[in-house]
Amino acid sequence: MSEITFALAKGRLGDKIIDMLNKAGLTDVEFDADTRKLVIYSKDERYAFFLSKPSDVPTFVDYGIADIGVVGKDTILEENRDITEILDLGFGKCRMCVAGPKDAEAILNSGRTIRVATKYPNIAKEYFYKTNRSCEIIKLNGSVELGPVVGLSDVIVDIVESGKTLKENGLDVLEVVEPLSARLIVNNASLKVKYEEIGKIVDALRKLVEE
Ligand code: PRP
């Protein structure tokens, strides 16, 4: 059995962390980006990697199936699992924002219920609750920017990276909810039981982040 198990998001975040672990000399994983395999191992089989949907990474870590997970801060906030966030990996930087047409700014401060389209209902609900505004959340699964463009919602709560999607659809950032980046998360029991091994991994990754 592998000593340490990782839950990684398939795609960019997963590829990047495997590169970092290899670079830190911790693993020697040969990762074929086109593979359909869902479990891959380091050559010495000390580490196993489970490739899941980003939103499921905190679930595997919470249940202790994976000792360590790598996932965006957006997913950590949205999933709200009982895990420990241990390191900001410094890549995948973007922002969770309230966005919409410029004139929606007035609606945000009008005191009336704001219609919000989002892939992140929990983050959106919490943000408007904290800022003392009432909202109606409309859950969408992608292309959220369509919401205000076609009149489904007043605004969106979504990730803004380059800002290109907003710009091309005539929308602006109206409020910033939270800066985001990839984070290392750890199962709470593993943190105690596998303290040394996990500590070694965290220290090596921290060194790379600080380089
Ligand atoms: C994300 C996000 C925005 C876009 C932001 O969507 O939900 O739509 O990227 O990036 P930008 O600021 O660089 O334009 P994603 O690409 O994941 O697709 P989706 O809308 O189908 O979820």
Image (cartoon, helix red, strand yellow):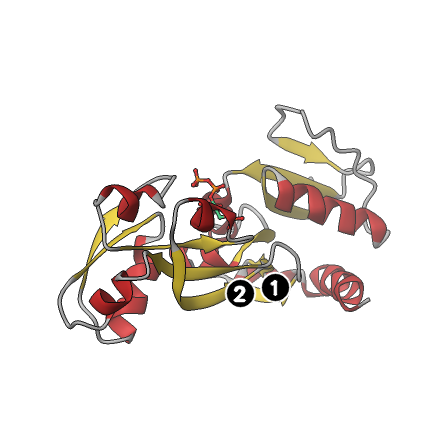
Toward which corner of the image does residue 110 lie, by quadrant? bottom left
Furthest-left residue in view?
A: 112
- Could you tell me how far apart the alpha carbons at marks 2 and 1 are, in whole angstroms? 9 Å
Residue drawn 80% across the image and 66% down it: 207
Question: Quick check: can you spot residue 2?
Answer: no
Residue 208 disc label: none
List x then y, in percent, for residue 109: 22, 73
Relative to the observer, which residue lies in front, 100 or 75? 100
List x then y, in percent, for residue 183: 59, 59
Q: Which residue is mark 1?
A: 191
Question: Quick check: can you spot residue 9?
Answer: yes
Toward which corner of the image does residue 123 lie, by quadrant? bottom left
Relative to the observer, which residue lies in front, 150 or 159? 150
SS for dot 1: helix
Q: Is residue 18 above or below residue 98?
A: above
Residue 160 placement, left or right of 185: left
Q: Are marks 2 and 1 in contact (CB under 8 Å)?
A: yes
Mark 2 residue crowding within 10 angstroms, few (<14) / some (14–19) / many (20+) = some
Q: Is residue 57 above or below residue 130?
A: above
Residue drawn 73% across the image and 35% down it: 41
Residue 125 placement, left or right of 120: left
Q: Which residue is mark 2?
A: 84
The amino acid sitting under disc 1 is Leu
Relative to the observer, which residue lies in front, 133 or 77? 133
SS for dot 2: strand
Residue drawn 72% across the image and 65% down it: 199
